[in-house]
Structures are given as structure tokens and as C-alpha cells.
Amino acid sequence: MLNATPGAISQGIIWGIMAIGLYITFKIMDIADLSVDGSFATGGAVCVMLIRSGCNPWLAVLAALCAGGAAGLITALLHTKCEIPAILSGILTQLALYSINLRIMGGRANQPVSVDKYPLLVSQRYVRELSLRNPLPLIILLTAVVIGFMYWFFGTERGCSMRATGDNPNMAKAQGINVKNNIILALVFSNAIVAFSGALIAQFQGSADINMGRGAIVIGLAAVIIGEVFTKKFFKNFALKLLGVSIGAIIYYLVLQVTLQLGLNTNDLKLISATIVAVFLAIPYWKKLASQRAGRKGGRNA
């Protein structure tokens, strides 16, 4: 268990970046965007194929980020210009991205990128080493950069108008805010960050896979919900809320690691993931129910 902990923490932090991207649409804009499963794999595919062709890994990650933004733009245009519901727009984009990702990877479902042959930014191989090759410091730094950028951006006039759109689109529209433009920007921004995380995960695990994004929406929502459950009382600042999302992803992967260490079948991984998410989603309700019962007992005793 101790040997697996550094890897679980590192992977949790990278998935936390993905969850921060999902936080934009799910919590700020109140949009159910299911295209992230596809854009996550797009980020990984673009990054790996560029690295395999000799591209600098930083440029490959930047290209992955742009590709994710383009995927988000497709969802946004389907939703805002074609009046297709957001959840259906995301499903259509996700479906289309499956074929696009296959084409990006040359028709193969999996493309390896070994740290022995290519200069990767992060690699799971060095996760337990006390050296500069350990991916943990860079992952933490990148997470801090993402959180810092989002904290700055959502403090600007454009960022505040996006938050107002998410809170009450009708009121925002009455105030002269272009709601559709804000939705487009949010979906582009969100999917770009998701693809950025996908590029890091692909390097971390040493390959890009066509199914690497399957269930990403569940992991992202788990990180957001778990982060809220554990940090809501203490993290009131917007930047701290984003940090809480990252912490939620780490907790999710640690819990997942513990359950797997108990000897459960790896074929049940999706079932375990869904169960973990369901439990943490139910915790706020259980707390509310317990406080109501305590209040009734107190009233009777009085």
C-alpha cells in the first residue's frame, strides 16, 4: 500500500487538474458537459503523437490544450448556435471525438510513448525516486499555475460576467451580458484544461489509449463533490475551493487504491468508482438528515 501511495497521489493531482476544468462548467456555469470524456483522450492522443514525431513535450502539451479547446468549441456551437441541449451537445461531440482520436493515433487504439525513447515531462517510473525526475514537484507546480490563472481570470470583468451567467442567466442577460459568448468561452476553457490533464496522464502512464477518457466525467465529479465535502467549511476563497477540488481527486484515488488493495477484482473498477462517487454524493444528505433528527430529539427533550 505504501509503495502505491506516491503513484496514487501523483495520479490524483493530475486528475485534479481535469476536475478543475470540469468545475468551470459543472459548478460555475451550471452546464452538464459530457464531451470531457472525449476531449481528455484527445489531449492524450495529440500529445503522444507529437512527442513520437520528435516534437518538444512542452509544445506537445500546448497543442493538446488547443485541441481540447477546439473540442469544447464544437460543443459550445452545437449548444448556442444550433439550440441543442448542452448534455446532448456534449454526447454528440464525445461520439465524434472517438473517430477523430482514432485518426489522430493513426488508426490504432493505443500508442505507447516510453520514457526511455522520448523526453517526457512526467513519468510514473520515477514517482518513488528522490530526484529531479520525480514527477510530483512539476505536477504540483502545474496545478498551482492552473489555479492561479483561474483565480486571476475569474476576478476580471469577463470572469465575473461568466460567474453571473452561471448564477442567473436571465438576470445576466438583463444586465447586458452576452450569455451565449460566455457559455462558449466556458466550454472552450474547460475542455482545454481537461485536454491538458489528458496530455499529462498520457505521459505519466506512458501511452495514449482511445478509452483513456472513458469515465473521466465520473472521476471529475467525484473530485468536485469529495473536495466540497471535506473542505467546504474551511475553504471559502475561490482559489482555495479549486485547491479543494484537487484535494478531492487525491482522496478519490487514495480510496480507490485502498479498495483495490483489499483484493477486489480489477474488472469491478468502474463499479467501485461509481460506488465511491455515490457515497460521497450522499454524505451531505446524510449529514442534513442526522442534524434534523438531532433537532427533533432536542425539541422533544425540551
Image (tube, grey):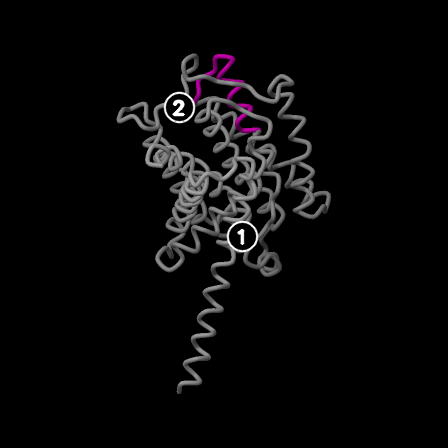
Residue 266 is covered by the magenta coloring: no
Q: Position of residue 198 (x, y in %)?
A: 50, 31
Q: Is residue 33 left or right of residue 256?
A: right
Left or right of residue 165, residue 160 in this image = left
The reply, left or right, for residue 25 in relation to residue 262 is: right
Assign the magenta stretch its main secondary structure: helix
Name the residue tied to disc 1. 278
As drawn, 222 above or below 257: below
Q: Nearer the viewer, residue 1 or 96?
A: 1
Q: Quadrant of residue 295?
A: bottom left
Tell me where the magenta segment starts and ends, as one range: 42-57
Q: Which of the two residues, 280 or 52, is positioned nearer the viewer here? A: 280
**Could one spot residue 122 in this view of the protein?**
no
**Circle 1: residue type:** Ala
- Identify residue for label 2: 121
Q: What residue sits 52% from the left and 32% below the top? A: 195
Q: Position of residue 187 (x, y in %)?
A: 58, 42
Q: Which numbered circle lies on residue 4?
A: none
